[in-house]
Amino acid sequence: VLAEPKQIQFRLPEESVLPAMETESGTLYLCSGYDVSTQILPGGDLDGTVRSVSGCGREELTVLETAAGEYRRLDFVWTVNSDEGEQVCRAAILDDGSYHYVLSAMTDADNAREYGEMWNGMFESFTLS
């Protein structure tokens, strides 16, 4: 029997958030100039979760693995080409042994530096309750 999933918590600047969309697997926040999403995925296969989030295998990325209290944490950045141009993406995964909790953000490559500090604060505040 799997444990009940915890709740994802993080700080997102209030003035930047437009209405969020709830999906079966998480929440999408449409912000001014960037998008943020959260997901709760089944635990176990961290490599599979990294691939699901980024479209890249763990071996194709530079993944920083740390301990965040009692949780295992992975952080990584990647780029993708879309119809809108090149996008810069950042994600963090918290692993509690039962689930993978994902926080990710995406913006146009031209805007990435502008949101760097804001994203740093958002990802630093990423925790579970």
Image: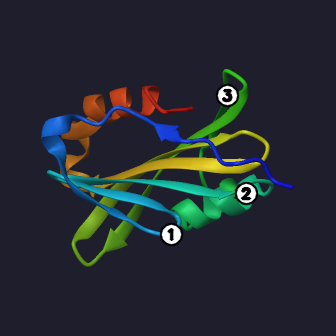
| Badge 2 amino acid | Asp
Which colour style is shown?
A: rainbow
| Badge 3 amino acid | Thr
User: Camera-side residue: 46 or 19?
Assistant: 19
Left or right placement of residue 111 versus residue 74 in this view: left
Which quadrant of the view contains residue 29? bottom left
Element on which disc 1 rests: loop
At label 1, counting other C-alpha atoms closer than 10 Å, the crowd grade (few under 14, some 14-19, many 20 or more) is few
Which of discs 2 and 1 lies nearer the camera? The answer is: 1
Left or right placement of residue 31 versus residue 87 in this view: left
* Separation of marks 2 and 1 at Cα, in angstroms: 22 Å
Residue, x 53% and y 61% (percent of image)? 54
Element on which disc 2 rests: helix
Label 1 sits on residue: 24
Q: Residue 39's spot in the image, x, y percent?
A: 52, 56
User: Camera-side residue: 90 or 37?
Assistant: 37
Q: Which disc number belongs to residue 47? A: 2
Mark closer to the chain start, 3 or 1 = 1
Residue, x 43% and y 27% (percent of image)? 125
* Separation of marks 2 and 3 at Cα, in angstroms: 15 Å
As drawn, the residue found furthest toward the bottom would be: 83
Q: Residue 10's spot in the image, x, y percent?
A: 41, 34
Quarter of the image for the C terminus: give it: top right
Quarter of the image for the N terminus: give it: bottom right
Q: Which disc number belongs to residue 66? A: 3
